[in-house]
Amino acid sequence: MPLVTVNLLKGRSAEEKDAIAASIQAALVRTLDVSDANRYQLFNEYDGENFRHTGGYLGMTYSDQLLVIEITVRAGDDDEHKKSLLAEINRNLVASGVVDADDVFVLITEIAGANVSFGRGLAQRSPTSPSAG
Amino acid sequence: MPLVKVNLLSGRSAEEKDSIAAAIQSALVSTLGVPEADRYQLFNEYDPEGLRHTSGYLGMTYTDRLLMIEITFLEGRDDELKKALLAEINRNLVAAGVVGADDVFVLITEIGHANVSFGRGFAQRAPISPSVS
C-alpha cells in the first residue's frame, strides 16, 4: 500500500534506480513494518526544464541528484514512526551511494483505510463492518 | 515545502513554463508567507491521449491550455488563506498571459507537520518532542 513515487532528473542507470527502490522499501519494511511484498513504486523522470527547485532551503544544498520522493500511506502512524521512516530512507539512500544526505526530499501523504484497493475491487484495508447482533 | 505539480499538454515553451512557475510561486509567497527559497515544482507534460478532461463544468469552459495544478503543503492554514491562494494563483497566471482564467484547475492537499523531510532525514517541521522534566 505504500505508493512510492520518486521524481528525479533523467540520467540515472537502471542499477541506480534499483538501489533507490530497494533503499526506500527497506525503510518502509523496517520502520512501518510493511511486508516486503507490499511494494508499489513509480519513477518519474524529468528533463531539467520540468524539474524545478530551489538551490537550497533550511540549510540543505541541493544538486542535480535531488530526489523528490512522495509516499502515500494509510493514516495511523504516529509522528515518531514517520520521523523514523524519514531518517531511515535517508540513511539507506546515502549508504547505497546513490545520493547525498541533503538531496532527499520526502513528503508523506496519509489516506483513510477505505481509500485503497489492492485488486478485485475490494477495500482490503477498510475497517471491517460491524457484524449484526 | 509546498510541492507544486503542474499537469499540462506538451507544447509550452520554456519561457511559458518559467512564467507559470513564477506565477504560482509568487502566489505562495504573497498569500501563505512561504519563503522564496522554498520552491519545489514539477511539470508533467502529456500528449492529448494522456490528458483528458471535460470541456466545461460549473460554468467554466476549458481549452487545450488547461493547467491542472496540484499543491501539497502543511495543514493548519484556514479557509480564507486557501481561498486567497487560489485567487492569487489565477490572477498571476492570467496576468502573465499564459492562460485564460477558466483554464486553471487547482487542488490542494494538506499533510501533517511530521510528514516532510527537506533533506538529511530530518523532519524539519515536526513538533518538538516534549522534553522530560
Image: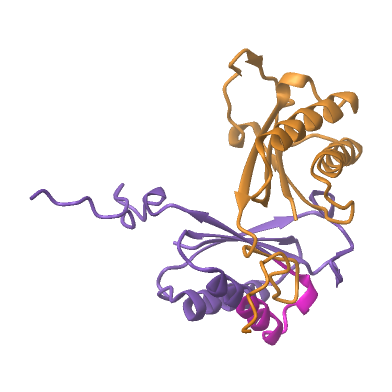
Q: Is residue A133 above or below residue B115?
A: above
Query: Which picture quadrant has residue B53?
Result: top right
Q: Check the picture and name the quadrant holding the N terminus of chain B.
A: bottom right
Which chain is tinted purple?
Answer: A
Q: Main secondary structure of the magenta part?
A: helix
Foreground: A15 or A88? Answer: A88
Q: How is the image coloured?
A: by chain
- Residue most toward the left? A133
| Span shown in magenta | A87-105
Residue A18 visible in the displayed image:
no
**Residue A118 inside the magenta-drawn segment:** no
Where residue B86 appears, as percent x and y from the top left, is 73, 32
Query: Which picture quadrant has residue A4?
Result: bottom right
At 53% from the left edge and 79% from the top edge, which residue is drawn? Answer: A26
Where residue B49 appears, as percent x and y from the top left, is 59, 33
At 43% from the left edge and 76% from the top edge, which residue is drawn? Answer: A33
**Residue A89 inside the magenta-drawn segment:** yes
Residue A122 relative to residue A107: left or right:
left
Residue A128 relative to residue A103: left or right:
left
Where residue A21 appears, as percent x and y from the top left, is 58, 72
At 58% from the left edge and 16% from the top edge, which residue is drawn? Answer: B58
Residue A44 relative to residue A131: left or right:
right
Foreground: B37 or A91? Answer: B37
Which chain is tinted orange?
Answer: B
Query: Which picture quadrant has residue A18?
Result: bottom right
Q: Is residue A97 above or below residue B22?
A: below
